């Protein structure tokens, strides 16, 4: 049995999920800051980044709704969190770096998460 399969069987408490989400946000913010420090901020790369969790159900989604993190995607389905890094930059690549880290952390807990971005 893989580590991810084992994680799916573990029942986490809401407080633990909140700590995981907070940690994911902190690491996403650091990834966005690090990107800008390494590459600079590109004003012509203006855009957005987000993560989507599918399916939009389960304990993590319940907690995210309680703390008002993200929203249900009524158009395509799933649960979206826009700019999980929280970084105020308009540089899509920096936001994308944060979204990828955020998604990676949630995937390590067995969620099906994808990171997306698009130019404005």
Image: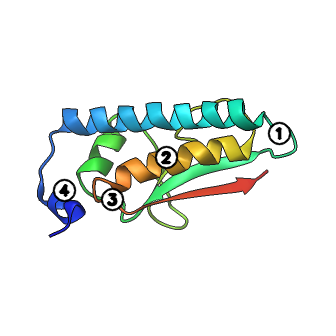
Residue 82 percent location from the top left of the image:
56, 45
The alpha-carbon separation of the residues under discs 3 and 4 comes to: 10 Å
The alpha-carbon separation of the residues under discs 2 and 4 comes to: 19 Å
Residue 86 percent location from the top left of the image:
56, 32
Residue at the spot of label 3? 111
Residue at 78% from the left image edge and 34% from the top image edge: 41
Q: Is residue 54 above or below residue 94?
A: below
Residue 91 shows in the view: yes
Q: Which mark is residue 42?
A: 1
Residue 84 percent location from the top left of the image:
52, 40
The answer to whether residue 49 is left or right of residue 30 is: right
The alpha-carbon separation of the residues under discs 1 and 2 comes to: 20 Å
Disc 2 to disc 3: CB gap under 8 Å: no
Residue 73 percent location from the top left of the image:
50, 58
N-term-proximal mark, 2 vs 4: 4
The answer to whether residue 20 is left or right of residue 41 is: left
The alpha-carbon separation of the residues under discs 3 and 1 comes to: 32 Å
N-term-proximal mark, 3 vs 4: 4
Closer-to-camera residue (112/42): 42
Residue at the spot of label 2? 101
Q: Which mark is residue 7?
A: 4
Check the picture and name the quadrant holding the N terminus. Answer: bottom left
Disc 1 to disc 2: CB gap under 8 Å: no
Q: Is residue 16 above or below residue 96?
A: above
Closer-to-camera residue (117/33): 33
The answer to whether residue 17 is left or right of residue 97 is: left
Secondary element at image label 2: helix
Q: Is residue 18 above or below residue 102?
A: above
Closer-to-camera residue (59/90): 90
The alpha-carbon separation of the residues under discs 2 and 3 comes to: 14 Å
N-term-proximal mark, 1 vs 4: 4
N-term-proximal mark, 1 vs 2: 1
């Amino acid at each position: 049995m893989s580590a991810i399969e084992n994680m799916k069987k573990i029942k986490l408490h809401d407080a633990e999920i909140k700590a995981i989400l907070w940690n994911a946000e902190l690491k996403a913010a650091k990834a966005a800051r690090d990107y800008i420090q390494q590459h600079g901020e590109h004003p012509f790369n203006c855009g957005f980044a987000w993560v989507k969790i599918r399916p939009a159900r389960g304990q993590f989604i319940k907690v995210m709704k309680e703390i008002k993190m993200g929203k249900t995607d009524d158009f395509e389905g799933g649960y979206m969190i826009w700019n999980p890094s929280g970084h105020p930059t308009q540089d899509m690549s920096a936001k994308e770096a944060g979204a990828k880290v955020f998604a990676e952390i949630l995937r390590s807990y067995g969620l099906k998460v994808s990171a997306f971005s698009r130019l404005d």
